[in-house]
Image (cartoon, rainbow, N blue to C red):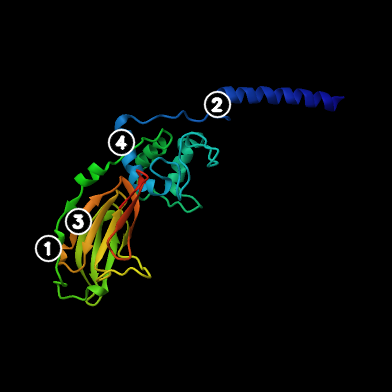
Amino acid sequence: MKLKHTTKYGAAILAVCVGMAASSGVAFAKKAKFVPLNDAEFEQAKSMYFQRCAGCHGVLRKGATGKNLEPHANKAKKTKGTLKLGTKRLTKIITLGTEGGMNNFDDIFSKKEIDLLARYIQMEPPVPAEMSLALMKERHKVFVQPKDYPTKPVHGRNWQNFFIAIERDKGSIAIIDGDKKEVIAHITTGYAVHVLKTVEHHETLHAKDAGRFWYVMGRDGMMTKIDLWADPKNMKVAQVQVAYDARDVAVSGDGKYVIGGGYWPPHFVI
């Protein structure tokens, strides 16, 4: 009987203590209330997200190689939503990275910027505008007319042993002479160059002087055409923006067609 009474009163005391702790907020602190960004902070975070995060998580945050980052739960993606994770947890993930392969960003962003980004991804993603063909034509620039392309290499170098290096964060590429081990040109391209290609190998289609022209795609959808026969100062012969967010470019075996693929808008342009 004594044991029963002790258990009864002990449970009652425990219940009172739990109630007091919960009401005082000492032992059972509530989750911090989400603080949305103001307009200026939102624009800053949007730019940061596009530059550093959209490549893996997608412009609309629906996920790509990285996880879905929509604010609310997505059963199809099996995600709880960023609002569920909260600012504190998201800040820690952005700061330190994850075991799944996401790198840390504490050496790229300040603590204040990480806080902005953590709150930004808890808000609804802005939907970018579509890009029309008319706008692409407007942003098409020709620096050297095709009729003025050189008929033979003009620099006296072995262009077939040139290397092209991506200078990602600078938004450019470097042309390197493999014979003389010299950097002969730095060419401004789109932001954060993702890929560059020349004619694709094909069993029946063959391009004349394969490897002469290269096409560079930046993450901002800017495609740049490079001529390795030209004087290093004039190797950039044309440029056009085909999307706001893009990753790839491909060239037909005969070199007559170039196709750029965009994440946003989700289209391809020939």
Q: Which residue extends farthest right?
A: 1
Lower position in the chain sequence, tag 2 or tag 3: 2
Residue identifier under label 4: 43
Q: CA distance from mark 1 to mark 3?
A: 12 Å
Q: Is residue 3 left or right of residue 91?
A: right
2 vs 3, front mark: 3
Circle number at residue 25: 2
Q: CA distance from mark 1 to mark 2?
A: 76 Å
> Is mark 4 in CB contact (under 8 Å) with mark 3?
no
Q: Tag 2: residue type?
A: Gly
Residue drawn at x 80%, y 25% as measured from the top left: 6
Counting from the top left corner in percent of width and height, residue 116 is at 37, 37
Is 13 above or below relative to 63?
Answer: above
Q: Tag 3: residue type?
A: Ala
Residue identifier under label 1: 148
Q: Is residue 33 visible?
A: yes
Is 155 above or below relative to 25?
Answer: below
Q: Is residue 126 left or right of residue 152?
A: right
Local SS, label 3: strand
Lower position in the chain sequence, tag 4 or tag 2: 2
Counting from the top left corner in percent of width and height, residue 260 is at 32, 53
